[in-house]
Image (tube, rainbow, N blue to C red):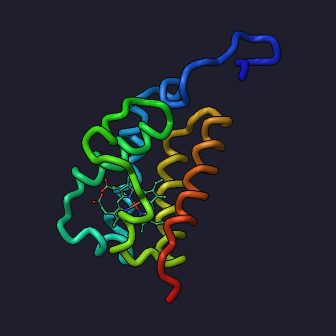
Amino acid sequence: MRASEEGPAVTDTLWAQVGGIETFERIVRAFYAGVREDPVLAPMYPDADWEGAIWRLRAFLEQYWGGPTTYSEQRGHPRLRMRHAPFPVTPDAKERWLKHMHAALDEAALPPMHDAAFRDYVERAALAMVNRFE
Ligand code: HEM
């Protein structure tokens, strides 16, 4: 990818290009501010370990987008579908999760290409996480 038609090649990861840890922290905090207030999603976090949840999602997303691999060093292979099996991820829960993530991304206002890539990824990942249909 190039910065413009004849610009320099872009070799940095998306993680670095959007501002690294600070940007991911901002997105995930805004996301969880919505989740905490959501009547369907909030009860799925009975321990209310919000800081832990923020760390896990932030570290996972940073790793996915080319940042540090701290998530796997501490949590092992993500196996996200398996890790979500205990939670009732219905189509409604998925739509709610995405609504909060989209709101967080609206606030972050990433450059358009990065914003589109991020939304496309979470959309597909969320669909793959659905594990209940009632
Ligand atoms: C589709 C709706 C989803 C629901 C309702 C949901 C719900 C949950 C819940 C209740 C937890 C446990 C809280 C915790 O211990 O962190 C969790 C963990 C997690 N979720 Fe989701 N999630 C959804 C989608 C996603 C998606 C799309 C991703 C990634 C793009 C994701 C990434 C994670 C990660 C990384 C963890 C922590 C896993 C661990 O290391 O234990 N989730 N999710």
43 left or right of 18 in image? left
Residue 37: image location, x then y, percent: 34, 67
Report how many numbered discs are placed on residues in the image. 0
Q: In the image, what residue occupies the spot 37% across and 30% down?
A: 68
Q: Quadrant of ligand 1?
A: bottom left
Name the residue at the bottom extreme: 134
Say which residue appears at 36% left-offset and 39% top-offset.
25
Percent x, y of residue 33: 34, 56
Q: Position of residue 112 (x, y in %)?
A: 66, 36
Toward the front, the furthest residue is 77
Q: Nearer the viewer, residue 78 or 125?
A: 78
> In the rendered view, would you say 100 is above or below 88?
above
Above-or-below relation of 86 to 79? below
Q: The N terminus appears in which quarter of the rendering?
A: top right
Q: Identify the residue at horizontal 51%, vertical 72% (top origin).
A: 130
- Residue 50: x percent and y percent? 24, 56
In the picture as drawn, the residue positioned furthest to the right comes out as 5
> In the drawing, does residue 54 fall left or right of residue 8?
left
Residue 80 shows up from this direction? yes
Q: Residue at x 31, y 47 (%)?
A: 76
Lateral position of residue 7 relative to residue 121, left or right: right
The answer to whether residue 11 is left or right of residue 25 is: right
Q: Would residue 29 be visible to someone looking at this image?
A: no
Q: Is residue 112 depicted above or below 129 in this figure?
A: above
Q: Quadrant of residue 84?
A: bottom left
